[in-house]
Amino acid sequence: MHLLDHIAFTTYRSLGKALAAGSYHKLYLDECHALKDSHEPGLKAHTAQKRSILGLTGTPPAQAHSEKGRLVATYCPIVVDYTTDEAVLTGLLNNYRLVVHRPPLRTARLRAHYQVRQPVHHQRARELRLLEQAPSQRPPGSVTH
């Protein structure tokens, strides 16, 4: 028998239903900060049977008394706390660098794109006209790029 035959995957949206329908030896909760009060009956039943829960998160709840803070503290309290630098040094995370390239937007290219590739909808035409106006002529809250 293969290990995957013994593993059930679900989403947080379906977690309550999955816990009510079955009995699991272990719960692995990725992004455990996504827990909600609606999950609590199933989590209570799971822990009442002395079953374990491993919660993983890179963004633990900032407020301990919030719904998410209470659920994380109760059902998957933080045991190990790694900084990003520690995780990179130990090989848990890859050492990567993000480079963001911001290309300049050109109104002529936008206009050509909408005229050639697709019919210009009235709203798009209005947006293109606003883009071509000087910033001082644009109405407040209008498209600016």
Image (tube, rainbow, N blue to C red):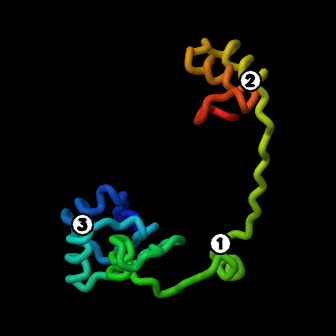
Image quadrant occupied by the C terminus: top right
* SS under mark 1: loop
Residue at x 76% of width, y 33% of height: 105
Q: Amino acid at mark 2?
A: Glu
* SS under mark 3: helix
Residue pointed to by mark 2: 132
Residue at x 40% of width, y 70% of height: 29
Image quadrant occupied by the N terminus: bottom left
Q: Amino acid at mark 3?
A: Leu
What is the CA distance from the residue labelled 2 to the residue labelled 3?
56 Å
Does the CB distance between marks 1 and 3 fall below 8 Å? no
Mark closer to the chain start, 1 or 3: 3
* SS under mark 2: helix
Q: Quadrant of residue 117?
A: top right
Residue pointed to by mark 1: 93
Q: Quadrant of residue 72?
A: bottom left
Q: Quadrant of residue 42?
A: bottom left
Q: Is residue 68 above or below residue 17?
A: below
Dot 1, crowdedness within 10 Å: few (<14), some or many (≥20)? few
Does the CB distance between marks 1 and 2 fall below 8 Å? no
Residue at x 56% of width, y 15% of height: 122
Q: Is residue 33 above or below residue 87?
A: above
Residue 35 on image: x %, y % = 35, 67
Front tag of 2 and 3: 2
What is the CA distance from the residue labelled 1 to the residue labelled 2?
45 Å
Q: Is residue 80 above or below residue 69?
A: below
